[in-house]
């Protein structure tokens, strides 16, 4: 086998391995232990019906920092239980949705927005985390956002 053929075989093998490793990453089950919704209308309706704030996780498919956030913070037992109990959790792919524009997300992902249940504009925002924050910091910001709603 020539050098070009060997290199092509290696590239194809790597692409297949990466593809297999990312299967399911865009589904709710692939985002740690947080119970993410994928539909804005459903999330807003639940938030209003249950009188709960929302946590909206903006990500893209090819985002290493998003993957770190999912593997570290969103897989944390204490944080995921807290989010699932106190918030309506919505994930939104900023590369496929226009929701990020409503919250003034300029393409920087991951960005997580804590929002009151009564709207989808930046003025309803309670808190924001930009980047892959560790679970303990994420928990503190979520707690402050929740306390802001309860005041």
Image (cartoon, rainbow, N blue to C red):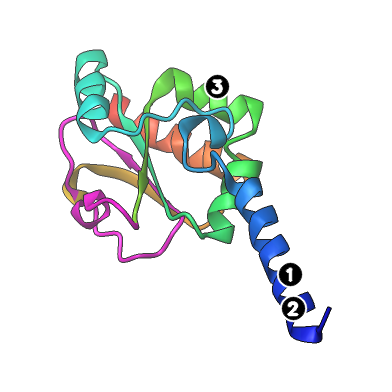
Residue 150 drawn at (x, y percent):
31, 24
Q: Secondary structure at mark 3?
A: helix
Quadrant the C terminus occupies? top left
User: Horizontal placement of 134 versus 87: left or right?
Assistant: right
Which residue occupies the extreme top position in the image?
50
Determine the main secondary structure of the stretch shown in magenta.
loop
Residue drawn at (20%, 15%), measured in percent from left and top?
Answer: 49
Q: Is residue 105 magenta?
A: yes
The magenta span reads 95-121
Residue 147 drawn at (x, y percent):
38, 30
Mark 1–mark 2 contact, CB under 8 Å? yes
Residue bearing mark 2: 5
Q: Nearer the viewer, mark 1 or mark 3?
A: 1
Where is 28 relative to 47, above or below? below
User: Horizontal placement of 62 versus 7: left or right?
Assistant: left
Give the mark, 1 or 3, whose residue is nearer the N terminus. 1
Q: Which mark is residue 29?
A: none
Question: CA separation, marks 2 and 3?
Answer: 50 Å
Mark 1–mark 3 contact, CB under 8 Å? no
Question: CA separation, marks 1 and 2?
Answer: 6 Å
Residue bearing mark 1: 9
Residue bearing mark 3: 81
Mark 2–mark 3 contact, CB under 8 Å? no
Disc 1 crowd rating (10 Å Cα; few below 14, some 14-19, many 20+) is few
In the depicted view, which residue is nearer to us: 2 or 132? 2
User: Horizontal placement of 148 versus 8: left or right?
Assistant: left
Disc 2 crowd rating (10 Å Cα; few below 14, some 14-19, many 20+) is few
Q: Secondary structure at mark 2?
A: helix
Residue drawn at (55%, 35%), measured in percent from left and top?
Answer: 30
In the depicted view, which residue is nearer to us: 23 or 148? 23
Disc 3 crowd rating (10 Å Cα; few below 14, some 14-19, many 20+) is some
Query: Dividing the picture into quarters, in which one does residue 89 lie?
Result: top left
């Amino acid at each position: 086998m020539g050098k070009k053929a060997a290199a092509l075989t290696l590239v194809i093998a790597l692409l297949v391995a990466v593809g297999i490793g990312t299967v399911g990453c865009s589904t709710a089950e692939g985002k740690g232990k947080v119970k993410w919704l994928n539909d804005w209308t459903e999330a807003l309706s639940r938030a209003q019906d249950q009188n709960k704030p929302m946590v909206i996780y903006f990500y893209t498919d090819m985002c290493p920092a998003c993957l770190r956030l999912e593997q570290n913070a969103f897989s944390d037992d204490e944080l995921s239980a807290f989010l699932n109990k106190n918030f309506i959790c919505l994930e939104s792919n900023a590369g496929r949705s226009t929701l990020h524009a409503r919250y003034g997300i300029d393409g920087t992902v991951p960005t997580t927005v804590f929002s009151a249940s009564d709207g989808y504009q930046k003025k309803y925002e309670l808190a924001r985390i930009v980047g892959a924050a560790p679970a303990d910091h994420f928990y503190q910001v979520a707690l402050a956002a929740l306390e802001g709603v309860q005041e």
